[in-house]
Image (cartoon, helix red, strand yellow):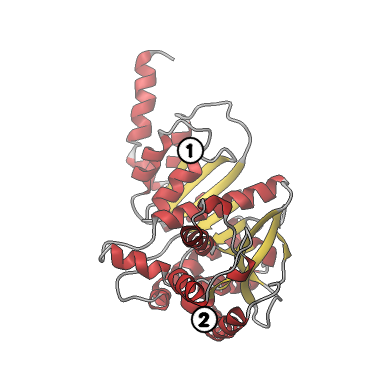
Amino acid sequence: MDANQRISVISAHLNPPVHLQMEGNLGLEQMKCRAKGGSAGFKVAILGASGGIGQPLSMLMKMNPLVSLLHLYDVANTPGVTADISHMDTNAVVRGFLGQQQLEDALVGMDLVIIPAGVPRKPGMTRDDLFNINAGIVKTLCEGIAKCCPKAIVNVISNPVNSTVPIAAEVFKKAGIFDPRKLLGVTMLDVVRTNTFVAEVLGLDPREVDVPVVGGHAGVTILPLLSQVKPPCSFTADETNYLTSRIQNGGTEVVEAKAGTGSATLSMAYAAVKFAESCLRGLRGDASVVQCSFVASQVTELPFFASKVRLGHHGVEEIYPLGPLSEYERAGLDKAKEELAASINKGVAFAKK
């Protein structure tokens, strides 16, 4: 290929003909501009890739050596995000998909689907205020997953997770493809925050701290089990109250600090990638991959609950019991379950309408 031909290929990649965009072939045309010979890896789709969480999440997943193909989908701005991220000199091939008409193309053949799509929290909003908008978005996206990649592992980030995961489950049940091992609500940000805040109190590196966070992913449903902290230590009553309150209100802390300009997007993207990498490591066959996640569960009487799970070839391979709880944590668990039950029921009712 001479210089003029190479220039023509690059030009076509950056400015594809309108008829190709309309026909949904943009991803195929862009592939002509990709390097060949990349190593094998997993196929990952991000639904909501142009949003506040989606963009940094897409960038971080492009950097992950376990990813060989990265599909970026959104209803707006994906061509720009795709072009930008595709210039990064890492192995993963990037394809962009724009609008509902290209959703199915974005999903075919995926191993892992990550859903950060939806509107962000604003000052004064609770996660429940987001329900009516985000519930419909998640339902539509999961209908596409059920049709195009029913065996994929699905990571749900879209809030309120306590309701959107049950919505996804009902969509998959209706389609006859529900596998509880493959549907995971991402509560990793609660764990990341907990480890960070506890490390500040103890004067440790956060990477040396591990605290399980159970329950759900909103307010009092977020229950850090500080009595099970590693390395082992004890907290005063004041420290326990302070840490639990700050962890449960971590999202609000960021929303208020951003003063109306956004929510916890960067830390959420970081946490989502940590969790996604754990899912991919499980798929690869790595041993002892354990994280907390909001999943279909029999740990409590509730149909969904966040606790430690072991990840493997099929997604969730084992769900661990809560272990010994302090009196403070037992009281917190009762509060968490009451609110969590209402959120789960709300999601199920929405999906069945």
Q: Is residue 89 left or right of residue 283?
A: left
Q: Decide which of 278, 239 is in the foreground and name it.
A: 239
- Residue 294: x and y, percent? 59, 68
Residue type at mark 1 is Leu
- Above/below status of 204 relative to 246: above
> Amino acid under label 2?
Ser
Residue 236: percent from the left, percent from the top? 53, 73
Q: Earlier in the sequence, mark 2 or mark 1?
A: 1
Relative image position of residue 93 (x, y in whole percent) = 51, 36
Depth order, front residue of 308/284: 308
Count neighbours of disc 1 (C-alpha within 10 A) and say few if under 14, some if 14 to 19, many if 20 or more. few
Labelled disc at residue 152: none
Query: SS at mark 2?
Result: helix
* 247 to 14, vertically: above or below: below
Q: Nearer the viewer, mark 2 or mark 1?
A: 2
Give the residue drawn at x 42%, y 78%: 128
- In the rendered image, which residue does mark 1 sit on? 28
- Picture coordinates of residue 224, whole percent (x, y): 56, 70
Q: Answer few, some or many: residues within 10 Å of disc 2's Cα (few below 14, many 20 plus, some between 14 and 19).
A: many
Q: Is residue 323 above or below residue 316?
A: below
Q: Where, by quadrant of the figure, is residue 336 drawn?
A: bottom right
Q: Residue at x 74, y 49 (%)?
A: 287
Q: Is residue 268 visible?
A: yes
Horizontal side of residue 318 vs 108, given as left or right = right
What distance separates the C-alpha of mark 2 from that of mark 1?
41 Å
Q: Residue at x 60, y 62 (%)?
A: 146
